[in-house]
Image (cartoon, helix red, strand yellow):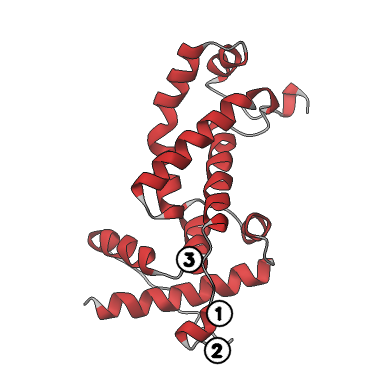
């Protein structure tokens, strides 16, 4: 891609120093991004210790592959994708014997399209409810609403179809509504 069409990157000097093996530049990038990347990781795996390990692993991968960064997206977006993929790999490896989510919750293919609106005071309650969702639902909700990925991107990351991503999201919203009503 030509530099004319490249994504402007405010941290390019640090990236260039990292490419030369400058450990102080690596530390500075870590300092700038570790909180956001930890938050991304914990939203996917749901465990603080695992999220920390995943974040560290993702930073190692990023620094190891920093020469592949082509400035086509912001450095933060590139790094976030590495964190998301590392977290998803972890989730796939820890998979337990599965019961169909539809079977577990008695859901039909006809899902409720109702959107739920939450006041700022209930954000913590909503985040706790998201943690209670079955893993597949939680991943789609997190990747779509919190991380901002499209259904096509989610489908690619999770190895599902985009229509499955959409239906999982609709069903997750229904389940969230049920969970939140139980807590009222």
> Which of pointers 1 and 2 indicates the residue nearer the eye?
1
**Quadrant in which residue 109 is drawn:** bottom right
| Rendered location of residue 7, percent (x, y) | 64, 30
**Quadrant in which residue 82 is drawn:** top right
Whether residue 153 sits left or right of residue 39 in the image: it is right
Q: Earlier in the sequence, mark 1 or mark 2?
A: 1
User: Which residue is denoted by mark 2 in the rendering?
Assistant: 108
Quarter of the picture containing the C terminus is bottom left
Question: In the structure shown, which secondary structural element does the residue marked by tag 2 occupy?
Answer: loop
Relative vertical location of residue 167 with respect to residue 26 in this rendering, above or below: below
How far apart in space, not on screen, are marks 1 and 2 (Cα)? 12 Å
Whether residue 57 sits left or right of residue 35 in the image: it is right
Q: Which mark is residue 135?
A: 3
Front-lying residue, 10 or 155: 155
How many neighbours does mark 1 have within 10 angstroms: few (below 14), some (14-19), or many (20 or more)? Answer: few
How many neighbours does mark 2 have within 10 angstroms: few (below 14), some (14-19), or many (20 or more)? Answer: few
How far apart in space, not on screen, are marks 1 and 3 (Cα)? 11 Å
Q: Do callouts 1 and 3 mark residues in contact (Cβ within 8 Å)?
A: no
Q: Residue at x 55, y 89 (%)?
A: 108
Q: Which mark is residue 168?
A: none
How many neighbours does mark 3 have within 10 angstroms: few (below 14), some (14-19), or many (20 or more)? Answer: some
How far apart in space, not on screen, are marks 3 and 2 (Cα)? 18 Å
Quarter of the picture containing the N terminus is top right
User: Which residue is denoted by mark 1 in the rendering?
Assistant: 100
| Rendered location of residue 10, percent (x, y) | 53, 22
| Rendered location of residue 43, percent (x, y) | 42, 53
Relative vertical location of residue 155 with respect to residue 111 in this rendering, above or below: above
Q: Residue at x 58, y 30 (%)?
A: 62
Question: In the structure shown, which secondary structural element does the residue marked by tag 1 occupy?
Answer: loop
């Amino acid at each position: 891609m030509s530099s004319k069409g490249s994504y402007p990157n405010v941290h390019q000097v640090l990236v260039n120093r990292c490419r030369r093996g400058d450990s102080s530049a690596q530390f500075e990038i870590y300092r700038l991004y570790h909180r956001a990347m930890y938050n991304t990781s914990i939203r996917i795996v749901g465990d603080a210790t695992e999220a920390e390990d995943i974040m560290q692993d993702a930073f190692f991968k990023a620094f190891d592959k920093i020469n592949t960064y082509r400035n086509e997206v912001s450095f933060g977006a590139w790094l976030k994708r590495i964190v998301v993929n590392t977290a998803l790999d972890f989730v796939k490896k820890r998979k337990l014997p599965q019961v169909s989510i539809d079977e577990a919750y008695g859901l039909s293919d006809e899902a409720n399209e109702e959107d739920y609106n939450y006041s700022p005071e209930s954000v913590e309650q909503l985040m706790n409810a998201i943690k209670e969702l079955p893993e597949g639902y939680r991943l789609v909700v997190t990747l779509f609403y919190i991380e901002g990925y499209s259904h096509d991107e989610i489908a690619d990351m999770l190895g599902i179809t985009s229509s499955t991503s959409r239906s999982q999201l609709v069903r997750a919203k229904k389940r969230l509504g049920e969970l939140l009503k139980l807590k009222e």
